[in-house]
């Protein structure tokens, strides 16, 4: 296993659209193991392959307190979405920034699990927020893009300043 570097907004590679996984083979399972290790080390509750510059439709999520409930979503598709809910979001690719985002409150998502088996999950709350956040990454979208241009400009300035200060 390996901890992989996470790319940071506004890196243009975060805007790459991921392609579907053709077969869930050993190479994909190795990618998943590395993504899980990277997410737990960060620490974060989710990670999309896009964030480690791999542009395949693979997501790992664990919203449990004990880091013992890994959820793997390959080629996810939202098949139902209902209601709206506002939640404060953060992102490992936008460190230190937390902003409110409105998303569907209740979703059903269809995906392949780590064994390549088609699975449907119906959920709400933080898990629904996280799944939608990660699926956006696979489409090349970062949560700050839901914010006003003014807020986005301020976030870019803040991140650049922080990079300057740590050099
Ligand atoms: O660790 C994370 N926490 C989080 C909190 C609220 C909403 C979404 C997230 S996802 C984030 C990890 C991450 O950047 N995944 O892409
Ligand atoms: Ni993120």
Image: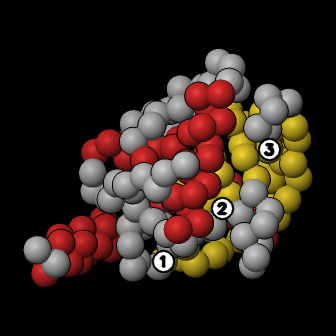
What crowding class fits label 1: few (fewer than 14 Cα within 10 Å), some (14-19), or many (20 or more)? some
Q: Is mark 2 within 8 Å of ligand 1?
A: yes
Q: Disc 3 and disc 2: Cα gap in Å?
A: 12 Å
Q: Can the viewer see residue 134?
A: no
151 or 38, which is in the foreground? 38
Q: In this view, does 20 lie above or below 11?
A: above
Q: Is 22 left, or right, of 163 in this rendering?
A: right
Image coordinates of residue 131 in percent, x first then y, are 68, 55
Badge 3, how many Cα within 10 Å: few under 14, some, many 20+?
some
Q: Where is residue 21 in the image (x, y as percent from the top left)?
A: 62, 25
The answer to whether the residues at label 1 and label 2 have Cβ atoms under 8 Å apart is no
Q: Compare residues 48 and 135 and report the one nearer the observer.
A: 48
Q: Quadrant of the C terminus?
A: bottom left
Disc 3: which residue: 109
> Residue drawn at (53%, 26%), measured in percent from left and top?
19
Question: Can residue 119 be seen in the rendering of this structure?
Answer: yes
Residue marked by disc 1 = 99
Residue 149 in picture, x, y percent from top left: 30, 65
Pointers 3 and 2 in contact (C-beta within 8 Å): no
- According to the picture, the residue beneath numbered tag 2 turns out to be 130
Question: Which comes sooner in the sequence, label 1 or label 2?
Answer: 1
Q: Position of residue 16 (x, y in %)?
A: 39, 36
Q: Residue at x 37, y 46 (%)?
A: 14
Vertical comparison of 19 with 106: above or below: above
Callout 1: SS: strand
Q: Which of marks 1 and 2 is in front?
A: 2
Earlier sequence position, callout 3 versus callout 1: 1
Provide the secondary structure element on which disc 2 rests: helix
Count of labels shown? Answer: 3
């Amino acid at each position: 296993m390996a901890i992989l570097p996470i790319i940071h907004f506004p890196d243009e590679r975060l805007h790459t659209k991921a392609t579907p996984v053709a077969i869930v083979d050993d190479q994909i399972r190795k990618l998943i193991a590395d993504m899980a290790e990277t997410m737990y080390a960060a620490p974060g509750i989710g990670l999309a392959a896009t964030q480690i510059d791999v542009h395949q439709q693979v997501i790992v999520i664990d919203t449990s307190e004990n880091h013992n409930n890994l959820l793997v979503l390959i080629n996810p598709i939202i098949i139902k979405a209902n209601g709206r809910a506002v939640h404060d979001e953060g992102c490992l690719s936008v460190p230190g920034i937390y902003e409110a985002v409105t998303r569907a409150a209740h979703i059903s998502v269809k995906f392949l699990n780590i064994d390549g088996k088609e699975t449907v999950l119906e959920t709400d709350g933080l898990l629904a927020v996280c799944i939608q956040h990660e699926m956006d990454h696979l489409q090349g979208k970062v949560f700050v893009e839901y914010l006003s241009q003014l807020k986005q400009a301020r976030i870019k300035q803040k991140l650049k300043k922080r990079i300057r200060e740590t050099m």
